[in-house]
Image (tube, coloured by chain):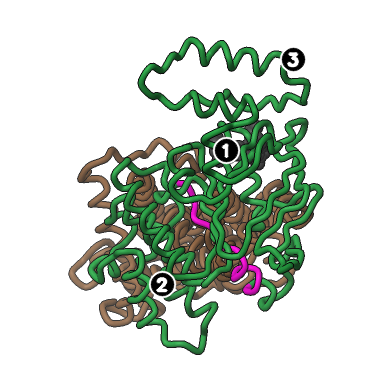
Amino acid sequence: MPEPLLQAVDLRRSFGTVHAVDGVSFTLPEGGSLGIVGGSGSGKTTTARIVVGLEHADAGEVRVRGRARPSRARGREQRLARAREVQMVFQDPYLSLDPRTGVDQVLRETLRLHFPDRDPEPRIRELLDQVGLGTRAADALPRQLSGGQRQRVAIARALAVEPAVLVLDEAVAALDVSVQAQILNLLADIREQTPIGYLFITHDLGVVRCVTDEVIVMRHGSVVEAGATAEVLAAPQHPYTRLLLDSVPHPGWNPDRIAAARQELTSPLAQPTQHTGGRSEPT
Amino acid sequence: MSTVLTRRPGLAKLRVRSGRSPLHLVCLGLVASVVLAALLAPWIAPHDPNAVDLGAALAGPSAEHPFGVDAAGRDTLSRLLLGARTSLLGPLGVVAFSTLAGVAIGTAAAWRGGWLDSLLSRATELVFAFPGMLLAVLVISVYGEGLLAPVVALGLAYLPYVSRLTRSLVLAERARPYVSAYRVQGHSALQICLRHILPNIAPVVLAQSTINFGYALMDLAGLSFLGLGVPPLTPDWGRMVFDGQTAVQHGYPLSAILPCLFVVLTVVAFNVVGERWADRVARRDR
Ligand SMILES: Nc1ncnc2c1ncn2[C@@H]1O[C@H](COP(=O)(O)OP(=O)(O)OP(=O)(O)O)[C@@H](O)[C@H]1O
Ligand SMILES: [Mg+2]
């Protein structure tokens, strides 16, 4: 059996008394797309940050093609190798780009770092083309671009490294709906063209349906349900997943019933697990 | 930006309101002309600043000596012009040293954190607790006369202001997601600091350094007024006030009052220009 592309084994991380991530495991097959859904404060971002190496795990490990990712990179070679394993697209494209660095400069820096022997210019054009940005955008500073265009730049920057896995943490949450659809299509296209794997973090079940093959549902730092996306969405097994699904406004939607269900779920009888002291339940 | 620049109590009241304030323009002009005078001094000075004409000693303003002559018979205007060189060169050294070292220390402390941060913060506090002028006097008493000793001493004394400011700026900057993005991309800490963090915080640091320039000028003038630092014959504003004491006693105060005036005006001008600069940076960032 081939090694999975990305594997998280029993990740744990607490901040003080808050168990932000509490025993999370998942597997992303080669070229696959895995969604992580959950309400606010369920530990999705912390999981993503552990996977990319911005946060260390208290316990557990992240493996890429069977090899454990070291918690700290030592030396240039290891740093670059780590970067080529996993790249990330952040939630807010208004903050994830340096305001003083132009679009082509962002890409050039990354290409020079990872491929010093190659001429970066043709590759810059290729990347901009791939994410649907014209050459006109190449000279622009981030503040001259719209949110959608900035997120395209962030995606191009991540792709420039040619990573095996792309982690997207609420990558479309800050964008309006029509731009969201464009970016999601773009991501689907990229997956068809390249053997990249996606770890797609979101609280939006519609997004999960579009771009993931498999999904895990997180609550209070642990995985409450996992399976093929279509199955989980069609026949949710865990009450929390059902609640998430019911919380999406639809015809005949009854907020009162959902509030009652949420009450039931958070009462100590129904949910004997730890309380994270985290933020509110999904809405 | 919530970072506050360090200013001394008296001068902090001098605030330029936004818009094209005339005070700011005047100060900008003053800074420019003082710098220009210092650069061009040897060519525009009417006399040799050290040429002694005892016959004309303590003479009032005349066509030949527009600002009069001091007690030793030297032309005041020429000494003021050439004095601008020493008086600006000293603070320039202080500011260059404190800015370079302060930025390096502040950045290292903020980026590394942990024991390095505590160590550097303690060391900075130690220098903070020690009055800069006292430090300068001490260093001069050990190393004797010359511009270098007081410049290094004051540079050390000003360093904590810059390093503390830099540390807080870098801490705020490194928390921004774009820094995380560069780290994920595999860029080294040094590259991220030099290429992205420093250019982003530079305007605020340079504004503080501009303000510091004025204070350093004042401190150095104070030292040379005490007869410390600048060697006797060098034209220097602080030294001129010191030399002018006898003239004041004889009722010819011009050769002492003028350099005083220049020191005060230059300090205020640098203060206003620096503050205004910081203001503009803060507004642009918002
Ligand atoms: N650096 C930190 N220091 C302290 N607590 C933290 C830190 N990061 C996260 N937490 C806590 O960990 C829990 C999980 O946070 P996390 O950001 O991973 O949730 P999330 O699922 O991404 O939420 P959201 O959907 O709102 O982005 C929260 O209770 C949060 O308050
Ligand atoms: Mg999050």
CA separation, marks 3 and 1? 25 Å
Residues rendered magenta in the picture = A80-91
Residue closer to the observer: A20 or A102:
A20
Q: Chain B, which colour?
A: brown
Residue closer to the observer: A33 or B11:
A33
Q: Quadrant of ligand 1?
A: top right
Q: Nearer the viewer, mark 2 or mark 3?
A: 3
- Secondary element at tag 2: helix
Chain that is green in the image: A
Point out residue A218 in the picture as x, y percentages from the top left corner. Answer: 64, 36
Q: Nearer the viewer, mark 2 or mark 1?
A: 1
The subunit carrying tag 1 is A
- Secondary element at tag 3: loop
Position of residue A55 in the picture relative to residue B77 (left or right): right
> Which circle's residue, 3 or 1, is located before the other in the chain?
1
Residue B213 higher or lower than B73, as above or below: above
Circle 3 residue: A268
- Find residue B66 and report its image quarter: bottom left
Residue closer to the observer: A81 or B3:
A81
User: Label 1 sits on what residue type?
Assistant: Val
Label 1: how many Cα within 10 Å (few below 14, some 14–19, many 20+): many
Circle 2 residue: B85
* Number of residue marks: 3
Circle 1 residue: A232
- Secondary element at tag 1: helix
Q: Are marks 2 and 3 on the same chain?
A: no
User: Label 2 sits on what residue type?
Assistant: Arg
Residue A33 higher or lower than B236, as above or below: above
